[in-house]
Image (cartoon, coloured by chain):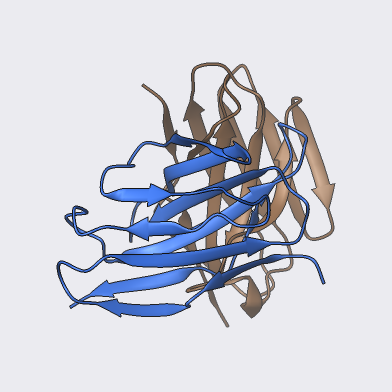
Chain colours: A blue, B brown
Amino acid sequence: DGGITQSPKYLFRKEGQNVTLSCEQNLNHDAMYWYRQDPGQGLRLIYYSQIVNDFQKGDIAEGYSVSREKKESFPLTVTSAQKNPTAFYLCASKGIRETGELFFGEGSRLTVL
Amino acid sequence: GQNIDQPTEMTATEGAIVQINCTYQTSGFNGLFWYQQHAGEAPTFLSYNVLDGLEEKGRFSSFLSRSKGYSYLLLKELQMKDSASYLCAALDSNYQLIWGAGTKLIIKP
């Protein structure tokens, strides 16, 4: 079945450590997105990519990094520079239509100890 | 600035009807989405409106008024499984989504 797979679902990290969240899709979508979700707030865009080897910063990119070496994959690294990394992270993709809906992965919950 | 407003929480009774409102202010507008999100899970697409009016899809309907910057999601014949957060998101002139904080809907028996 086509879809988006995020891993890990739960992740614990010590302060000062970098961690990478995986996002893979087999929907043949060009556009991929990373969002952060905190209680009581809307989804906030971290990074997005509309084509392989190209990506743009979203509203809250500081302390995060991404790569887009393959169409199917868009990993997110949460670096030690991110001051408050504990959150629920959602990866999404979209097809060719600008007005198309987003397809989301199941999310990764990161907790910094 | 760009802004989406929706109520934080609503409570309704099983079998009843509930309307979740959303108002938006965006630079340009290319449509409005509603997503459903159960706790700890991914959002799933419910509806997309770009023209004024009501669109019905089974028990769920979505309405848009572009002149008022207003949309609502109408849920009929509520079931316990409808307990979830409902996210409103507007597509701006750059085709970027602006998200509301979500409305947590609690269904009581």
The residue closer to the viewer here, A24 or A69, is A69
Q: Position of residue A73 (x, y in %)?
A: 61, 57
The answer to whether A89 is drawn above or below residue B63 in the figure is below
Determine whether, in the image, residue B82 is placed left or right of residue B60. Answer: left
Q: Residue at x 68, y 75 (%)?
A: B79
Q: Is residue A24 left or right of residue A100?
A: left
- Give x and y (percent) for residue A91: 54, 57
Q: Residue A36: x, y in percent?
A: 40, 54
Nearer to the camera, A8 or B3: A8
Residue B15 image point, x, y percent: 69, 72
Total number of numbered discs in the rendering = 0
Q: Quadrant of the N terminus of chain A?
A: bottom right
Front residue (pair A17, A98): A17
Give me the residue at 53% from left, 51% from top.
B87
Q: Is residue B14 above or below residue B99?
A: below
Q: Residue at left 41%, top 80%?
A: A10
Quarter residue B2 falls in: top left
Task: Give the vertical position of B94 relative to B55 (above or below).
Answer: above
- Image quadrant occupied by the C terminus of chain A: bottom left
The structure residue drawn at horizontal position 79% and vertical position 60%, both measured from the top left corner, is B59
Q: Is A74 positioned to the left or the right of B14 in the image?
A: left
